[in-house]
Image (cartoon, rainbow, N blue to C red):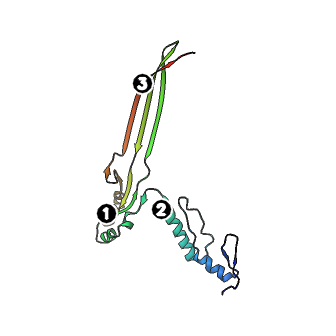
Amino acid sequence: MEEVFPTYDLSGHRITTTLTHHRMLTEGCSIAFLKPDCEGSCSSCSGKKAKENCKRKKTSCKGSALDGLSFPFLTDLASIVGLLAGEDIEIIDFKPPEMTFSFEKDIPITVWTPPNINIVLGFGFSATLEIALVLDSKGIREAVQEKKPIKALNSFAIRDIIDDVDTPLIVITGSVRPYELLTLGT
């Protein structure tokens, strides 16, 4: 059914006047979910298939919105062929942002007064954690072959080679800084 004078709302979207057109528009349900929050709802979708597609889009958005999360087998499709041939592949690679904990504390010690002469000892500490977590198919394959489900835990690993550089997992630094402080007056 074609309208001679189509109507539009204030935002420029076409308004359909018949129920069948409305049903056809919501059945397709082309809702876009935007990163990082993937806000939106699938409640406006009608029909089982439309709701399933909408939920799949939202789940995909949430999965790709995590910084550092990747699925290596999706970028290297030859690895899927290798998996079918019995080789082990990386399924998930997760590299969270570097985490750092640090603090500093200055302790003044009065040596002479007046004038005030202080020695200040400054203490500093920092710990940095940089890791990558990997899930591969090796442990899953072993668990199925040997019929021991506990072997599936062998699929999880901590990687310390990040961007082809062997980096330490934890870096701890400490410092002591003595310095002198002279205060004139009271």
Determine the residue positioned at 63% across, 71% down: 44
Q: Amino acid at mark 3?
A: Pro
Which numbered disc, 2 or 1, marks the residue that appears first in the sequence?
A: 2
Q: Which of the two marks, 3 or 2, is nearer to us in this view?
A: 3
Determine the residue positioned at 28% across, 71% down: 85
Q: For residue 45, what is the image quadrant?
A: bottom right
Q: Which mark is residue 178?
A: 3
* Image location (x, y in percent) of residue 159: 34, 52
Compute the Cα span from label 3 to label 2: 48 Å
Which numbered disc, 3 or 2, marks the residue that appears first in the sequence?
A: 2
* Image location (x, y in percent) of residue 149: 36, 61
> Within 10 angstroms of label 1, few (less than 14), some, or many (20 or more) residues?
some
Q: For residue 23, what is the image quadrant?
A: bottom right
Q: Which residue is mark 1?
A: 142
Q: Which residue is mark 2?
A: 64
> Within 10 angstroms of label 3, few (less than 14), some, or many (20 or more) residues?
few
Q: Nearer the viewer, residue 10 or 152?
A: 10
Q: Amino acid at mark 2?
A: Ser
> Within 10 angstroms of label 2, few (less than 14), some, or many (20 or more) residues?
some
Q: Which of the two marks, 2 or 1, is nearer to us in this view?
A: 2
Q: Which mark is residue 173?
A: none
* Mark 3–mark 2 CB contact (< 8 Å): no
